[in-house]
Amino acid sequence: MSEPKVKIALVIPAYNEARVIRRIVEDLHDVFWKSSYEFQVVVVDDGSKDDTAEQAHLGGAHVIRHILNTGSGGATATGLSFAYQSGFDIATTSDADGQHDPHDVLRGVEMLLQDKSDLLIGSRLIDKQGMSRVKVLGNTGLSVITNILFGIRVTDSQSGLRVFSQKALEQLKWKTSGYEFCSEMLWRAKQLNLTINEFPIKAIYTEYSKSKGQNNWNAVNIIKSLLRRRILEFFNE
């Protein structure tokens, strides 16, 4: 009798991504159909004003819709909660703008299964090819701040490509809903003694993807939010 297949939830938080989301979903399907895993693409439509949900559904995704925009952290939390409650063994997150190669997502799953990590981060900064100097500077700076505030050494704290074990899906929670959740997630994982590792991925930047996501000015707001939360919890410890 053959062993049951590992079940993977491929979570994509999305906000106003109707132009590209169908292709992103279909590309993930094409790669994972050739693997030995049972999988489902899950798009969390975070209160989009366009037809992101409809396009994701046409691509073959299971779609969860937020009535209001909650932010990247809120949409990610919804997708991972669905993965855990639905009994998936592993979940991944990747960006909805086409920045991540679906082959890297698959490689992350295989690496997590091999090295028994709880949280595996796809780092664009181990090999910086394809990243602009501005983005390298911004992401490196936020990784340094993450290390200073929380004592976590990673090269790319803001990466949207992450792979989660079932243990991480069960235990890992965070309180912020914006982009600062990327650093807070690492902090919470450390508090839970979860195993955190990285693996190199390539960044795919198109004119479309360059117009999305964070900018370096937003990094200032992220640092302020993280610092405020760190101070508040320090005095409550």
Image (tube, rainbow, N blue to C red):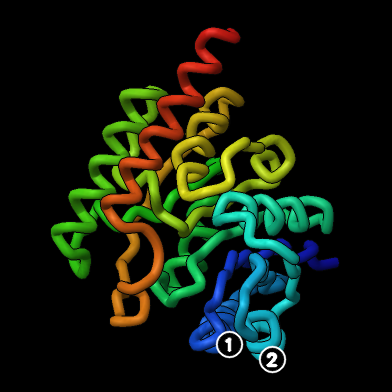
Amino acid carrying mark 1 in the image: Arg
194, above or below 197, in the image: above
Q: Quadrant of the N terminus?
A: bottom right
Residue drawn at (56%, 23%) of the image: 191
The residue lying at 75 percent from left, 76 percent from top is: 62
**Quarter containing the C terminus:** top right
| Quadrant position of residue 2 | bottom right
> With 58 as the anchor, is 231 left or right in this view?
left
Q: Which residue is mark 1?
A: 22
Q: Is residue 34 visible?
A: no
Horizontal side of residue 92 vs 87, given as left or right: left
From this view, report whether residue 20 is shown above or below residue 174. below
CA separation, marks 1 and 2? 7 Å
| Amino acid type indicated by mark 2 | Leu
The residue depicted at 47 percent of the width and 49 percent of the height is 179
Let me know if residue 182 appears in the view. Answer: yes
Relative image position of residue 198 (x, y in whole percent): 39, 46
Residue closest to the far bottom: 58
Locate residue 224, reporting x and y percent: 39, 33
How many numbered discs sit on the rendered protein? 2
Measured as percent of width and height from the top left, residue 218 is found at: 34, 50
Residue 79 badge: none
* Residue furthest to the left: 133
Q: Nearer the viewer, residue 11 or 29?
A: 11
Q: Which residue is mark 2?
A: 58
Q: Nearer the viewer, residue 123 or 114?
A: 123
Residue 27 at x, y = what percent?
Answer: 52, 84
Check whether the beta carbons of the residues at disc 1 and disc 2 lie within 8 A of each other: yes
Residue displayed at 53% across by 42% down:
117
Asked if residue 128 is positioned above or below residue 64 in the image, the reply reads above
